[in-house]
Every structure is written in C-alpha cells, then in structure tokens.
Amino acid sequence: WFDLQEEWSRVKEFCDSHRDVVKPPSREKRPLHETAKPLRGLASDRDAVLDITNIAQNMKTVSQRSLQRDWFGVVRGACKICEEGGERACESFKPSFQGCQTPQRLFERAVKEKDSDLMEFALKWNTFPAGKFCATCGYACELHETEEEFAKRLRIDAIVKRKQEDILKSKESEMRERENECQKRVKEAVLRQKEADANGEYIRETSLDFITQVRRGRCLKNSDCPGFKVIYRESDALNPEIMLYCSLCGHPSSEHPVDADWVDEQKRKRERESAQQARSAPRFRSVPRRTYDGQSEAKRSARRLLGVSTSASSNQISRAYKKMALKYHPDKNSSPQAQEIFVRLTHAFQLLLQN
C-alpha cells in the first residue's frame, strides 16, 4: 500500500544527492498488511482505511483457521453455495480421501432435488480421486473460497459490522438527545406553573391541539403519559415552543393520536344540533325575500385573510387555517413579519369559529 510515484521521486532525490553511488537504495520489505491492495467498490475512503487497518488481524484469523489444500494444492476455505438459515453450513474445506464416508448432506440434497445423477454420484463417492471434493458438503473444491477470497470476505464483514455499529450508536445518541429535550420541557412546565402561582397569574390547561383544534390522547412514545395536556399562561398562548408540546411528557402533539371518544362525542353533538334545527324549522313555506349579509367588517377581513368564501364550512376554514399557519409559522418562516401574520391568522380563525 504505497504510491509508486512518491517512491520514484524519493529514488531520484537520492540519486541526485548521491551521484557517486550507482546502485539505488534497495526497496524496503514491508509486511503484508501495508502492501496489500484495498478492496474495489468500497463506499468511501474511510472504508478503504478501515480495510487496510484490519488486514493484519484478518490474515492472523486466516492463519488460525488452519485451512487445508485441495487436489491442486490450493488452500480452500468455506463453501460458496451451501447455506443454512443465513449461515454457512460448510465453514472450511475438508478434502476427501480414499475410503471416507459419503457426506450426509449429499444424500439429503439428492433426495430433496430428486436428482438421480446426484444420487448416483453419492453412491460412487469412494471411487473418486482424493482431494477433489469436500468431505463435509460434497461440493467440488472449485466451489470453495480461496485464501484471498476468505480474507476479503472477512474484511468486508468487518466493514459492514463497523457501519452497523455506527448506525446504532447514532440512533441511540439521537434518542438520548430527544429524551433529554422532553425532560427539559417537563421541568420548564413545572417551573412555569410555580412562577405563575408565586406571581398570582392564572394558569390554563387544554387538551386541544393548537393547530388542528382536536383533542389528543395518550402518547405513543411514553406509556406513562396519561394524555395530551398543555399548561400555559396567558402570555404563553402564542408561543409555539409551549403550545405544540405536551407539558406532561414533553413530546410533540403529533405523537399523540386523536382521542376517539372525543371524535364520537363531537359527532353525536353535531347530530343532535342538526336534529334540533330540523325540529325548530317552520313547517310552512316561507316567502322568499331579499336578504342582506349581516356579517361585520371583522369577519369579512378574517375571511379575506384566510382566503375562504362566505359560504365556507367549518372544515374548509380549519383546512385553510392549517395551511396558512404552516406557511407563516415562526419555525418554518424566517421573515420578520411571519410572527405577526401568524398571530393575525390565529385571531381570524377563532373569530370565524365562534358561531
């Protein structure tokens, strides 16, 4: 593992500084882990460095495996074909010899595949030359790894294992940081409540989502959370860092599912209101007359700000508000007027949903 151009430049510098010396300096003998070439097709230079640093250990592992040679004198390792449950059934090549017993796996494979030629091959096992087939799996010696392939597989396995460990460590660190942030929000909620009690301020509690105005249930990430609840003061009503997170567990409102009981209750409430309106409606046909739009100027401006018509339903108003709120939210929009527009949108949405 060295650069030929750098070595040639060192030779030229040596010859220029020692012109009386005709013989160039001899090349230094380096160990195998420094002269071996890196694997091709690696993802990055870091993988190549990792490959080089693990070669010495891998070659030591190869030497400890005491691999055997085949008929042609080539050192053979594990089988490339036979695998059981994702693991290699034949870990190393075991050469056959005169009078050795036929491998049991050879008979099992012949019965499973219903191959008469393979069964005949298994019955004539003792007649074949020694060393051409493996006594463990029955495959030919060419189907087993060479010493280089075995070392290469060990290096690739080490790289994959290192990457998996790095991914697990990064995930664990992210989860740890997230839990620390949640605990910090819970502590801030407790301190906020104590400060309000000391100053005589009024503390408010709500189980509704600040954006969608729906009731949230138990947290999916924290089983100890009884339900979504926001504890805030009147001055914190427009602070997204407080209103969008649960004060009991610290997780965001998106990780709390919508309360199914609350949805059923709202549905029954709407049905009762519609039935009551149907009962209170006049039974005679009213004379059509000219009607005037009695909405105030504030409601007109609110509808104009949200971009909805006068005949828009509450679902359409909520959808338009959610779209505009996500666009002008201070965390999403960095413009100086974003917070003011967000506050105006919230007031307009509350005004239109009063009736």
Image: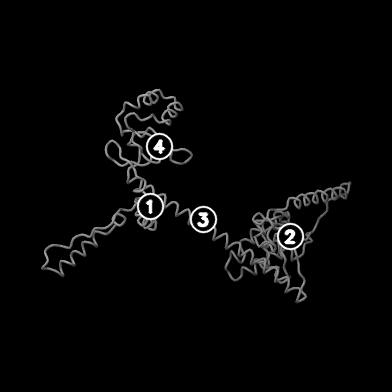
Q: Which residue is mark 3?
A: 168
Q: What crowding class fits label 4: few (fewer than 14 Cα within 10 Å), some (14-19), or many (20 or more)?
A: few
| Sequence order check, earlier mark of 1 and 3 | 1
Q: Position of residue 129 (x, y in %)?
A: 29, 30
- Vertical side of 130 occupied by 325: above or below: below
Q: Is residue 71 above or below residue 121?
A: below
Residue, disc 1? 42
**Nearer the viewer's eye, disc 3 or disc 2?**
3
At label 1, counting other C-alpha atoms closer than 10 Å, the crowd grade (few under 14, some 14-19, many 20 or more) is: few
The residue indicated by pointer 2 is 207
User: Which element type, helix, strand or loop, lies under badge 3?
Assistant: helix
Q: Amino acid at mark 1?
A: Leu
Give the Cα distance between marks 4 and 3.
31 Å
Q: Earlier in the sequence, mark 3 or mark 2?
A: 3
Q: Amino acid at mark 3?
A: Leu
Q: Is residue 104 above or below residue 272?
A: above
Q: Secondary structure at mark 1?
A: loop
- Name the foreground residue: 141 vs 343: 141
Question: Mark 2–mark 4 contact, CB under 8 Å?
Answer: no
* Residue type (three-letter) at the residue carrying disc 2: Ser
Q: Position of residue 121 (x, y in %)?
A: 36, 25
Q: Earlier in the sequence, mark 4 or mark 3?
A: 4
Q: Which mark is first along the chain, 4 or 1? A: 1
Q: CA distance from mark 3 to mark 2?
A: 35 Å
Q: At 63% from the left edge and 63% from the top edge, which residue is drawn?
A: 182
Q: Whole-percent x and y of residue 276?
A: 86, 50
Q: Quadrant of residue 53?
A: bottom left
Q: CA distance from mark 2 to mark 4?
A: 60 Å
Say which residue label 4 marks.
81
